Image (cartoon, helix red, strand yellow):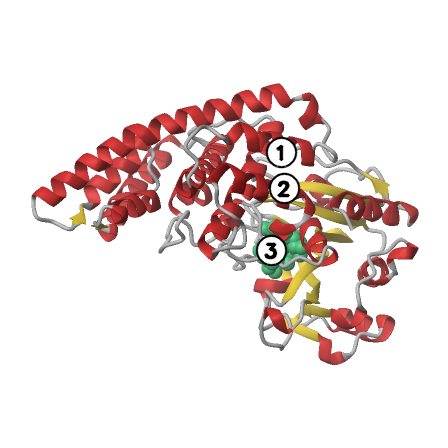
Amino acid sequence: MESAEIRRRWLSFFEERGHTVVPSASLIADDPTLLLIPAGMVPFKPYFLGEAAPPAPRVTSVQKCVRTPDIEEVGRTTRHGTFFQMCGNFSFGDYFKEGAITLAWELLTTPVSQGGYGLDPERLWITVYEDDDEAETIWRERVGVPAERIQRLGKKDNYWDMGVPGPCGPCSEINYDRGPDFGPEGGPAVNDERYVEIWNLVFMQYERGPGEGKEYPLLGELPSKNIDTGLGLERLAMILQGVRNMYETDTLRVLIDRAGELTGVRYGEDERGDIALRVIADHMRTAVMLIGDGVTPGNEGRGYVLRRIMRRAIRNLRILGATDPVAGELVEVVITTMGRQYPELITDRGRIRTVALAEEAAFLKTLRAGTNILDTAVSETREAGGRVLSGEKAFLLHDTWGFPIDLTLEMAAEQGLSVDEAGFRRLMAEQRERAKADARAKKTGHADMSAYRGIADVAGATEFTGYTHTEGEAT
Ligand code: ATP
Ligand code: MG
Ligand code: MG
Ligand code: MG
């Protein structure tokens, strides 16, 4: 089933059951606590909190989402993208646990010939929050899921919040067993790649205050009991299209193939190349979607998110062997594939291309200049009889030339040198401290940027320490 059809079925299933269809909001969150929208419920937050009246008691949407903290997972797991689409159905004080659970089960297990997604019920595993007897009873008695396919999990997995103060509540998730090819049995509690999470049903009932991770006070109950659900369109596409990886689904596979042609690397031949191709496909798509919603590359806020993501894609293209500017080609592919769902990409093609090409040109210039500095540093180190590039040099490359550390590591290694990474990280930490002190002095009142600051460092997924939690993003 094509992605476009999955989307169409979603919206019509819920529309037929009394939900008002709401178009996706822009990725630029209309919410001062978030830079970008990480989940389908964000545009509806005021309705959950009782701050505004909802347009209808039941709504449904397919929302564009960006989760920058997932950048470390991209290409390495089979199921994480920085951009993805979240299909959702929402109840504002209308149906609650039983309604959400029975609707979800019906849509997933109704045969394809009758408008559903036709999943085999025996492959579906359910998780519920550790003390949620009510949800478990509904799954067992109303739906008939056997007890051995229901697992209870703690806050980390089965208690949902936006990552910032706002509505929250326990949740119940539906996971699909992809079979023994994907690892040992035991259910989603032990193996999240085999039992891939597809749909989260959140019982939005409480309001949370500020805090780290899942350590926050509950401020009280919301004015009504609500439902917020989120199903990953790309994940369901992966299952329904019978592919191993969300990057092999219809809308992303074409990007991988084009990136393969542009670099001369064939997908499926070696794991490192495959990861890089998936990173390129993911990041180029995210970049185009961000530019489409009006973000322009810059050194702070959303512009910085876009810049890091685009540069990481371009760098991976170079590593795989592209020598000419190629971003324009990939932008075209994204516009063509995503333009079916988001026609504004097509009408805005010229502007999107211009922004992307300018950023690519600027980065290629940086890369050329930085490469000279790196080569000089490597020669000097060698002449002095050393085999380790100093932390200061790596820091200079990062700070002045925008060289991510993994690029320095990789390029130094090509010339037979290692890098004093500990020294580099010490200097980075010192700089972060200085920046924090500056920010305290300025008190700009903007959202905390710590979750974004480290993006440049994560590319190699070495010992990334840029953020320990994902403030400003959902988990
Ligand atoms: P996971 O545990 O796999 O990281 P999650 O628990 O963080 O997922 P939720 O916050 O519950 O995800 O979001 C609801 C749904 O959105 C998930 O069940 C999944 O189908 C989808 N989803 C979440 N993150 C991503 C992502 N990075 N890429 C693609 N789909 C995603
Ligand atoms: Mg999860
Ligand atoms: Mg989840
Ligand atoms: Mg996650």
Q: Is residue 467 left or right of residue 237?
A: left
Quadrant, the C terminus: bottom right
- Between 142 and 420, the residue placed more toward the observer is 420
Mark carried by residue 34: none
Q: Where is residue 37? Give x, y as percent.
A: 62, 40
Q: Is residue 326 visible?
A: yes
Mark 1 or 3: in front is 1
Residue kind at label 2, given as amino acid type: Val
Is label 2 in a helix, a strand or a loop?
helix
Mark carried by residue 79: 3
Q: Where is residue 170? Give x, y as percent.
A: 68, 62
Mark carried by residue 254: 2
Is label 3 in a helix, a strand or a loop?
loop
According to the image, label 1 marks what residue? 333
Question: What residue occupies the far left of the structure in this picture?
Answer: 384
Q: Nearer the N terminus, badge 1 or badge 3? A: 3
- Between 473 and 164, the residue placed more toward the observer is 473
